[in-house]
Amino acid sequence: MQILLANPRGFCAGVERAISIVERALEKFGAPIYVRHEVVHNRFVVDDLKAKGAVFVHELDEVPDGATVIFSAHGVPKSVRAEAERRDLKVFDATCPLVTKVHLEVERHRKAGREVIMIGHRGHPEVEGTMGQWPDGMYLVENVADVATLKLGAGGTAPPLAYVTQTTLSVDDAAAIVAALKARFPDIVGPKKDDICYATQNRQDAVRRLAQQCDVILVVGSPNSSNSNRLREVAEQQGVKAWLIDRAAEIRPEWFAAANAVGVTAGASAPEALVAEVVAAVAKLTGAPQPEIAQEDEGVRFPLPKGLD
Ligand code: 10E
Ligand code: SF4
């Protein structure tokens, strides 16, 4: 019995930055610091920041006048930014720069008169943020079937079109949806491939490689973490049974009954401490030796905003 680790896994540069923003704001200004939406989708991270004095809210009307508020790594619609300004709240923006890049693409396309089709998961905060960069001329498709039924414009003739994507999509699903868009709208413009970020691409590639060597894969991540769910799906598409777990306590011994090799990876919002906890628990349950815990450095770092650096 072997335990193998995916590389890279876990925290991406956008998550590192977002958590540091909350921690630095707490150090500099003291509690409470308000955070709109879970700063990243990880229960452990959120509970840890709560214990340090962060107050998580759904909307800005829960933030008192004069308070400091942090926007989550997933980004916010323009209306939220405007509301914070109107209320004179002190804002630190933890939106990942790679999400902001997509926001700017939307703005560029709309200013050039192109309507924009976003590929993403309805209801996800990143999708709400990106769709909220422009008040009209935005459409959402979640899958290939949506492309066929999409109704554009009022006049029946398709306007000039562009597409953008959520940063954490399945690379394969996104490629299929982009192909369907290009087949239906041959003149549509967009990024070279999609807006999937380096971290999503690298973690999906790594779990795909890992799946070649394992019978079972554990993905460390919270249930509401989109990119973590995609890692579980990618593993399963390789024919391996995969489980998404927040903590070691969720592990069931029967998962390893017929396994020769167990793989462990982690979503972009899952701390390495939880990977270590899960590896130790699997080793204890199965008698497998603990693997080398080393992590690959992807060489991406984002600076903190002014006032917190
Ligand atoms: O649900 P997601 O995967 O979008 O978010 P997460 O908080 O689990 O991971 C970080 C990813 C972000 C902020 C999306 N670009
Ligand atoms: Fe940024 Fe990608 Fe991490 Fe999202 S998953 S926070 S886009 S680096």
Image (cartoon, helix red, strand yellow):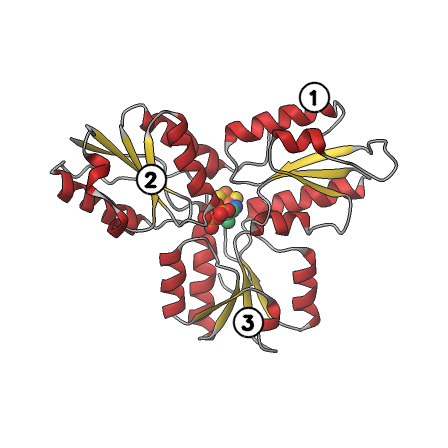
Q: Position of residue 157 (x, y in %)?
A: 86, 31
Residue 196 appearing in the image:
yes
The amino acid pointed to by label 2 is: Trp
Q: To which residue does mark 1 refer?
A: 183
The circle on residue 243 is 2
Residue at 58% over, 41% down? 166
Provide the secondary structure element on which disc 3 rests.
strand
Closer to the eye: label 1 or 2 = 2
Provide the secondary structure element on which disc 2 rests.
strand
Category of crowding for the residue at label 1, using alpha-carbon neighbours closer than 10 angstroms: few (below 14), some (14–19), many (at least 20): few
Q: Mark 1 or mark 3, which is nearer the start of the sequence?
A: 3
The amino acid pointed to by label 3 is: Thr
Q: Mark 2 or mark 1, which is nearer the start of the sequence?
A: 1
Q: To which residue does mark 3 refer?
A: 68
On screen, residue 185 versus residue 6, left or right, reads right
The amino acid pointed to by label 1 is: Ala
In whole angstroms, how far apart are the C-alphas of marks 2 and 3?
38 Å
Residue at 70% over, 43% down? 106
Q: Position of residue 190 (x, y in %)?
A: 68, 31
Q: Nearer the viewer, residue 157 or 212?
A: 157
Outermost residue toward the right in this view: 155
Q: Mark 3 or mark 2, which is nearer the start of the sequence?
A: 3
Closer to the eye: label 3 or 1 = 1
Provide the secondary structure element on which disc 1 rests.
helix
Q: Position of residue 241 (x, y in %)?
A: 32, 32
